């Protein structure tokens, strides 16, 4: 009898332990927004899968936003960061824009990937949060990346790395406190391009590729990398991206 009681007690203890481990709260929760009202990047699918795998690996939640009418204060309060993954054009109405503003003002975070800077040009608050807006790009080329801030994590494997990308040229900075962590060496590729009357000549010695800043009570991180689907299977890029997500969601770096 005592043996049966002991086995029963052990079974109950193991069940309790297993349940408590599985119910353990994740580090943080993120919302992935992929809405496009313009160019649809081929890398979107690869990006979603990579973010889901990254979340599983690093013990956080990544939820894909699938309900266009569900972008509300009540829904967003469960998240610590919103990720705009290759979004384009005007994707939020006036009410939803206010929801996003209140989300950041409450101390939460934003992560913009690649064409997140090609999104919501007429929403001034958003353009200041992103920091630079997309202007033009030449054809996809291989160039050399440069790390400008080695104190920000996730960048060591990108320093001096040859990287194939759709290198964006940006408008002048919309905010004056951007902390640029990554740039591209314009001497290693041809930045010149012309689309009708619109021209690109490059951005000079410092051509920013990734940056972060505190913004309106919250945090914003942006990386211009992520055009090609293969980017999202590259460990160097994924380390860079996770460091930005972690900082945006928690403030830790």
Image (spheres, rainbow, N blue to C red):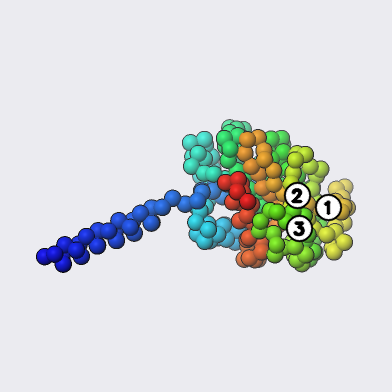
Q: Earlier in the sequence, mark 1 or mark 2?
A: 2
Q: CA distance from mark 1 to mark 2?
A: 9 Å
Q: Is residue 75 visible?
A: yes
Q: Earlier in the sequence, mark 1 or mark 3?
A: 3
Provide the secondary structure element on which disc 2 rests. Answer: strand
Task: Look at mark 3 in the image and give the residue it sits on.
Answer: 147
| Residue at image point 11% right, 65% down | 1
Disc 1 packing (10 Å; few <14; some 14–19; many ≥20): some
Observer-nearest of 90 and 152: 152
Provide the secondary structure element on which disc 1 rests. Answer: loop
Residue 86 pos. (x, y %)? 65, 52
Q: Residue farthest to the front?
A: 2
Disc 2 packing (10 Å; few <14; some 14–19; many ≥20): many
Q: Is residue 143 above or below residue 92?
A: below
Task: Look at mark 2 in the image and give the residue it sits on.
Answer: 180
| Residue at image point 16% right, 67% down | 3
Disc 3 packing (10 Å; few <14; some 14–19; many ≥20): many
Task: Kindly indicate whether the residue at mark 2 contacts the one at mark 1 (C-beta within 8 angstroms).
Answer: yes
Q: Earlier in the sequence, mark 2 or mark 3?
A: 3
Q: CA distance from mark 2 to mark 3?
A: 9 Å
């Amino acid at each position: 009898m005592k043996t049966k009681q002991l086995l029963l007690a052990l079974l109950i203890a193991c069940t309790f332990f297993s349940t408590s481990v599985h119910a353990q709260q994740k580090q943080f929760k993120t919302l992935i927004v992929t809405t496009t009202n313009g160019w649809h990047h081929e890398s979107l699918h690869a990006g979603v899968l990579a973010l889901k795998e990254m979340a599983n690996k690093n013990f956080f939640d990544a939820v894909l936003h699938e309900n266009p009418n569900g972008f509300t204060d009540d829904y967003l309060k469960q998240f610590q960061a919103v990720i705009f993954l290759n979004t384009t054009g005007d994707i939020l109405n006036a009410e939803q824009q206010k929801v996003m503003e209140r989300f950041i003002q409450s101390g939460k975070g934003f992560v913009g990937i690649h064409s997140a800077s090609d999104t919501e040009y007429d929403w001034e608050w958003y353009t200041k949060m992103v920091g630079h807006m997309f202007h033009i790009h030449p054809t996809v080329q291989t160039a050399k990346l440069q790390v400008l801030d080695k104190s920000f994590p996730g960048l060591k494997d990108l320093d001096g790395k040859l990287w194939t990308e759709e290198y964006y040229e940006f408008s002048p900075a919309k905010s004056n406190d951007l902390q640029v962590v990554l740039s591209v060496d314009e001497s290693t590729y041809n930045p010149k391009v012309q689309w009708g009357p619109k021209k690109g000549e490059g951005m000079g010695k410092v051509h920013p590729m990734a940056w972060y800043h505190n913004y309106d009570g919250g945090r914003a991180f942006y990386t211009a990398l992520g055009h090609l689907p293969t980017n999202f299977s590259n460990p160097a890029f994924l380390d860079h991206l996770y460091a930005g997500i972690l900082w945006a969601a928690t403030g830790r770096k």
